[in-house]
Amino acid sequence: MPSTRVPGIADRRLLTQAITNLVKNASEAIDALAVSPECPANFRGRIETRIVRLADSVEIEVIDNGIGLPRQNRAKLLEPYVTTRAKGTGLGLAIVQKIVEQHRGKLVLEDAPVAPDRPRGAMVRMILPMPLIEIAPVLPVVPVPEAIVAIEPTAGAMTAAPTVHSTPTADTPADGARIVPAKPNPVPAVSPTLSKNSGRVMPRPPGRIQGAR
């Protein structure tokens, strides 16, 4: 794993299934080498999973020191029902290929890098496009004010009254403004009057005499 976190957008369940399939294939490749005449002395299987962060993508590699991949027609192993093992179903890599395609990535089959404990083996690399993103910091929760009051200006002051989002501690501030509770605008009462030759209720204009034509 890298020294820092690798954020990205992906389907956790599908990627887990893909990596599980790759590790299972690597384990079976190690078992196949262990029972073959080509198995070296003091052989010990080893599976390595690595994550490499690039500028605009993430590479997930599963490397083993098993029997390795065939050199000819290697790409056909990604097709369904194609396998090199007698008891294999040929669906493991095909499922991984489908998952990588759903993430708009690429699946690559290569030989494992040579190491002292890995003279041969396979490496499967999932290349997933993941541009660098930044994790937004957690912002503190701002408490909701207990009361909202309006400052009514005194005579001669400006007509625009600011709103103070706090509870006053005195009836009269130092600037001489008088603090009053904010009230909603009153809704004028409308007396409904049935309009002639109509089934709708129409509002009666204020000041009109009831019954006048």
Image (tube, rainbow, N blue to C red):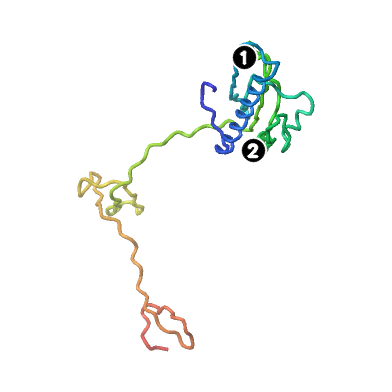
Specify the quadrant that holds the C terminus. bottom left
| 2 vs 1, front mark | 1
Q: Residue at x 62, y 13 (%)?
A: 117
Residue 201 vs residue 120: left or right?
left
| Three-letter residue code for mark 1 | Phe
Tag 2 secondary structure = helix
Q: Quadrant of residue 19?
A: top right
For the point 45% across and 85% down, the residue is: 195
Q: In which quarter of the image is residue 194?
A: bottom left
Q: Residue 39: percent from the left, percent from the top?
A: 67, 15
Q: What's the residue at 70%, 27% (across, down)? A: 109
| Up-down relation of residue 101 to residue 58 (above or below) | below
Q: Position of residue 60 (x, y in %)?
A: 61, 27
Residue located beneath label 2 in the image? 99
As drawn, the residue found furthest toward the right would be: 72
Q: Which mark is residue 43?
A: 1
Give the side of residue 73 with respect to residue 143, left or right. Answer: right
Label 2, label 1: how many angstroms apart (C-alpha)?
33 Å
Please tell me which of labels 2 and 1 falls first in the chain: 1
Which quarter of the figure is the N terminus placed in?
Answer: top right
Q: Is mark 1 on a helix, strand or loop?
A: loop
Q: What residue type is labelled 2?
A: Ile
Please report the residue visible at 35 percent of the width from the left and 41 percent of the height from the top. Answer: 142
Question: Which residue is more in the foreground, 194 or 210?
Answer: 194
